[in-house]
Amino acid sequence: MADYESCMECSAKLHDDDIAIFRKLVYRGAEEFLCIDCLGERLGCTRAEIERLIKYYRDSGQCTLFR
């Protein structure tokens, strides 16, 4: 069953950006998600790096996940 409300690792409440960046970087068809902090830990990068990517995709206007 799809869980759009909480991180599958730490159970933190998810926001739209958490879901969008997970789908962009991991799997577009995902139905379970990691929060930005857990995703960064899994990918070996910082929260700030992921937030920069989110800003980049939103500012570019090209990715429908960030509209």
Image (cartoon, helix red, strand yellow):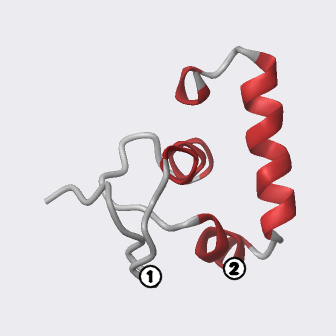
Q: Residue furthest left?
A: 1
Give the number of the disc on residue 9: 1
Relative image position of residue 12 (x, y in whole percent) = 45, 75
Asked if 21 appears above or below 11 in the picture, the reply is above
User: What residue do we see at 45% from left, 60% from top?
Assistant: 14
Task: Give the CA separation, mark 1 to mark 2.
Answer: 11 Å
* Residue farthest bottom in this picture: 10
Going by the image, does 52 lie left or right of 62? right
Q: Which amino acid does the dot numbered 2 rest on?
A: Glu
- Which secondary structure lies at badge 1? loop
Q: Mark 1 near mark 2, Cβ–Cβ under 8 Å? A: no
Give the vertical position of 55 relative to 32 (above or below): above
63 or 11, which lies in front?
A: 11
| Of 26 and 18, the residue lying toward us | 18
- Residue 38 in the figure: left or right of residue 30: right
Q: Secondary structure at mark 2?
A: helix
- Which numbered circle lies on residue 41? 2
Where in the figure is residue 59, as x and y percent of width and height? 80, 23
**Viewer-proximal residue, 25 or 48?**
48
Mark with earlier residue (1, 2): 1
Q: Quadrant of the N terminus?
A: bottom left
Q: Please tell me whether residue 57 is drawn above or below residue 24 in the rendered image.
A: above
Counting the numbered discs, the total is: 2
Question: Residue at position x 66%, y 73% from top?
Answer: 37
Q: Is residue 51 above or below residue 65?
A: below
Provide residue 38's location: percent of width, then percent of height.
Answer: 60, 76
What residue is at 55 percent from the left and 54 percent from the top? 18
Residue type at mark 1?
A: Glu
Q: Position of residue 26 (x, y in %)?
A: 55, 53
Q: Is residue 10 left or right of residue 57?
A: left
**Residue drawn at 54 percent across, 67 percent down:** 35
The quadrant holding residue 64 is top right
